[in-house]
Amino acid sequence: MVVVLAACSSAEGSDARAPAQAARQATPGAQACTATTRLIPSCGAWWGIAPEVFTGAPVEEALHGAESRMGATADVLHVYHRGSELFPTEAEIRLARDPAKPRLLMINWKPSFDHTWAEIADGALDARIDRLAGYLRRTFPERFFLTIHHEPENDVDGASGSGMQAADYAAMYRHVVLRLRAGGVKNAVTVMTYMGAPNWAAKSWFEDLYPGDDVVDWVAMDPYADDRVQDFDGLVNKTRKEYAQWPGFYRWMQARFPGKPVMVAEWGVFERPLDRSFKRAFFESVRRQIKRYPQIKALLYFDSPQAPRGDTSFDVGSGADKAFSELALDPYFRATRVPRP
């Protein structure tokens, strides 16, 4: 795959506890920083988290626990829904509408595990989509992020007629978004979420996944720091010698989507038993390097003691908790206030 690099987009991208509030108030010009209708912060980037995933903790308990551990509140709460579930839930709405510290919701929805993408695109779930649209109209008029069947790359089946080809995904995504809009859902800020791995980006069908600019507001990646990633630069621009033409996801997104904000919708740092200081050093690298990536407007950590490939808890490891807290409180992530409902 040959990618022509473009110039960096000029686009840039809660209320927290007392330390975070102080950080915001100390930020020059903080009062002038605002969020657009597509939830793009005019200054810095949103700070978010998927809290205590796979622990079984209810969402309110999980978020409050994670916020207490990191000493700051999140701008964005990342939650997961599937199938016929209606969202946001009452608990998620309470967190979004917290009068002291409102939060944006990033809702991750897989519409079905029983229907192919082609079947959904052909209308198999229209009743489900319409029911959700009605619920959203009645229940949650605030703007929220919505990603549909995130990380589709490893679900692609290239066989003819499978209903799960890359083009089927694009058609499914378009259909769901347009059906929701037709049902009166005007407040969903749509996100297309890629895995962020070079091996999938090198596939011949990779570009066919994209549903179209008219139904995608943000583009996102979900990179994790495995044993081949040493710092934030290497996380958001993963390259591999076996895929020599791949420039890295951030560079590709700059070239492919120069006018869209970028979200790091999931990122995590795996525990390294032989290097207990690695997480601390990695979090410090994020703080040093984040301003090199002005198109990244939201950074959402995946906090889990039992993620599929390891422990991504941010406070495990020598000095990791302090480094993560300092990152969460950095003025870059405290510059723009979450819009109040």
Image: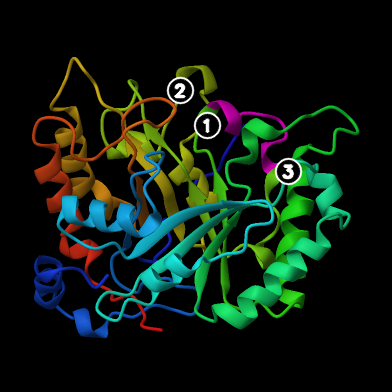
Q: Which of marks 3 and 1 is nearer the N terminus?
A: 3
Q: Are marks 3 and 2 in contact (CB under 8 Å)?
A: no
Residue drawn at (35%, 60%), measured in percent from left and top? 60
Closer to the chain start, of discs 3 and 2, is 3
Query: Which residue matches tag 2?
Result: 240
Q: Residues at badges 2 and 1 in contact (C-beta under 8 Å)?
A: yes
Check contact, mark 3 vs mark 1: CB within 8 A. Answer: no
**Relative horizontal placement of residue 109, taking residue 284 as reference (left or right):** right
Q: Name the residue under label 1.
A: 246
**Sooner in the amino-acid sequence: mark 2 or mark 1:** 2
Residue 208: numbered disc: 3
Residue 86 spot, x, y in % from top left: 62, 63
Q: Distance between the residues labelled 3 and 1?
A: 17 Å
Give the class, few, some or many, for how many residues have Cα within 10 Å of label 3's Cα (few <14, many ≥20).
Answer: some
Amino acid beneath label 2: Arg
Q: Which residue is drawn at 9% across and 74% down?
A: 26
Q: Which residue is located at x 43 percent, y 66 percent? A: 91
| Magenta-drawn segment | 199-207
Relative placement, left or right, of 285 versus 56 is left
Instruction: Name the amino acid, label 3.
Output: Asp
Going by the numbered disc 1, the residue's amino acid type is: Trp
- Location of residue 23 by image quarter: bottom left
Binning the other alpha carbons within 10 Å of mark 1 as few (below 14), some (14 to 19) or many (20 upward) gives many
Against 123, residue 317 (above or below) is above
In whole angstroms, how far apart are the C-alphas of marks 2 and 1? 8 Å
The quadrant in which the N terminus is found is: top right
Quarter-of-image position of residue 161: top right
268 shown above or below 95 = above
